[in-house]
Image: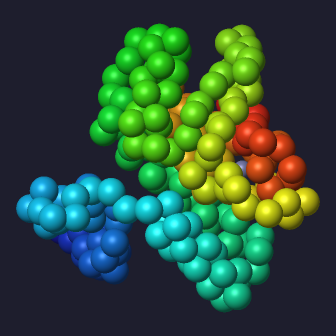
Amino acid sequence: MQLCEHILNMTLYIQGAVMAERMYKFSWDFIGNLEEGRPNLGNSTRVEVYRLFQYALRDILEEEFDAEKADNLLYKAGYVAGKALAEKFVGKVDSLDDFVKKVQQVLLDLNVGILRVESADMDKMHFLLTVAEDLDCSGLPDMGHAVCTYDEGFISGVFQSFSGKNYNVKEIDCWCTGDRTCRFEVKQA
Ligand SMILES: [Zn+2]
């Protein structure tokens, strides 16, 4: 009995220590009360500000680690964001059709991009999506490689929220590969 109690106390202590180390685990508190906080400026900013933030952070992540690790971290951040956004703005839906319609509308309402489903194989849970006028890349120079790593994670998180399953998402066309729309391959992991 004493040993059990000791183990329980140790577990609580370790959990407490781990939790104490997390200062910025994502919650909607970090979005805050915008009506109260920005009564004059409101909840909009410009795409330049969003991209400035993303690509400045990416610059530093690549410098501190390397391009692969930076991509990996951006993907993970996108996943957290996509899952949180879907849970808050899409919620529970019964069918894939309803899910897609709701996500399309949310991404339009938030000026993220214009989502279309190009193909859907429900047996294999394998999808091809396009996002036009994508927030992360549309209008950037042709770089010969796709850049929307954050979006890959984001889409993975959105699909996870809908189905409870994990998905691997890979961007196969991007504004930065010379295509005029981003195209994502979504496969159940
Ligand atoms: Zn792209």
Q: Residue furthest left?
A: 36
Residue 79: image x %, image y %?
Answer: 53, 50
User: Residue 172 falls in which quadrant of the image?
Assistant: top right
> Which residue occupies 33% across, 57% down?
44
Q: In the rendered image, which quarter contains the C terminus?
A: top right
In the displayed structure, 89 sits above or below 138; it is: above
Q: Is residue 1 visible?
A: no
> Which residue occupies 61% across, 67% down?
73
Q: Nearer the viewer, residue 122 or 86?
A: 86
Residue 60: image x %, image y %?
Answer: 62, 85
Q: Nearer the viewer, residue 46 or 104?
A: 46
Question: How many numbered marks have been drawn onto this rendered protein structure?
Answer: 0
Residue 186: image x %, image y %?
Answer: 70, 33
In this rendering, position of residue 53 left or right of residue 166: left
Residue 96: image x %, image y %?
Answer: 52, 15
Q: In the rendered image, which quarter contains the N terminus?
A: bottom left
Q: Residue furthest bottom?
A: 64
> Which residue occupies 55% across, 47% down?
154
In the displayed structure, 68 sits above or below 188; it is: below
In the displayed structure, 115 sits above or below 176; it is: above
User: Residue 52 falls in which quadrant of the image?
Assistant: bottom right
Q: Nearer the viewer, residue 49 or 149?
A: 49
User: Residue 26 falls in which quadrant of the image?
Assistant: bottom left
